Image (tube, rainbow, N blue to C red):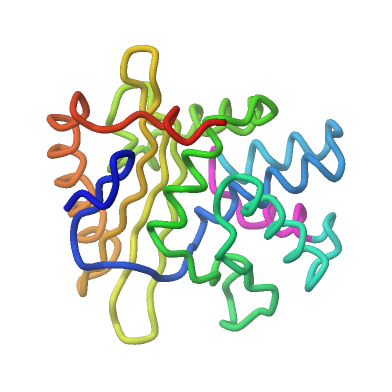
Amino acid sequence: MVGRPDLVTLGPWRSGPAWSTSKIPLALAALQHADSPATRALVGRAITASDNAAAEALWAELGAGPPAGAAVDAVLKAHGDPHTRTQWRRVRAGFTPFGQTPWALLDQVAFTAGLACDSGAGRVLDEMGGVVSEQRWGLGRLASARIKGGWGPDERGGYLARQLALVPRGRDLVAVAVAARAPGGFGPAVAALDEITAWLRKQLPTLPSAAHTCR
């Protein structure tokens, strides 16, 4: 379904927990707060290996709780997503608060397109290009894609895997956000994203560039 000239949407799934895709706006907020060697190291681990301890340390640098949530919200808004509100309470034991942020795919792809326009996001984009091989499923199978995935179980027995990405197409970048929910756990959810990616690879020449969102 084509929603507007610079956006293509497909499928019925609309929104759910951000899981570790939330580490991208968190990393940007942390670097804005303190672009130090220590922060850069934490950002690298949080993005390339989806290290939760590193992400929690970045969250703590921002003050944790409401101050950290507000800092991440400001990054979301600056990159084209004024709707999402970062979850700052730990609402599920054993999981990060920010990872449980409800993030709609439409808002996520708007943010990702905005990321392509940010000349100051180079470090984060570089880390997205260096995600470890075992996490380069789905959109990570596309050549030179800059990605971040998120995954986890819901409370009804399902499992969600989702990704945001900037995918090169010649001199352009295409912003993509995908998600798959499966009843059988991580493996089936990732397999579904692999199938979506195989379809996407064929469609890339026809998709709008992220540059349409740049001002």
Query: 48 or 123: which is nearer to us?
Result: 123
Q: Is residue 2 above or below residue 154?
A: above
The extreme bottom residue here reads: 156
The quarter holding residue 105 reads bottom left
Residue 97 lies within the magenta run: no
Total marks drawn? 0
Q: Position of residue 152 (x, y in %)?
A: 41, 67
Identity of the residue drawn at 31% across and 52% down: 178
| Horizontal side, residue 198 vs residue 14: left or right | left
Q: Is residue 196 above or below residue 140?
A: below
The quarter holding residue 27 reads top right
Identity of the residue drawn at 52% across and 56% down: 20
| Horizontal side, residue 206 vs residue 44: left or right | left
Residue 53 lies within the magenta run: yes
| Horizontal side, residue 83 vs residue 191: left or right | right
Query: 112 or 22: which is nearer to us?
Result: 112
Q: Position of residue 10 (x, y in %)?
A: 19, 55
Q: Quadrant of the C terminus?
A: top right
The quarter holding residue 150 reads bottom left
Q: Which residues are magenta?
A: 48-59
Identity of the residue drawn at 18% across and 54% down: 192
Look at the magenta stretch and give its main secondary structure: helix
The extreme top residue here reads: 171
Query: 84 or 128: which is nearer to us?
Result: 84
Q: Position of residue 79 (x, y in %)?
A: 60, 45
Identity of the residue drawn at 86% across and 34% down: 36
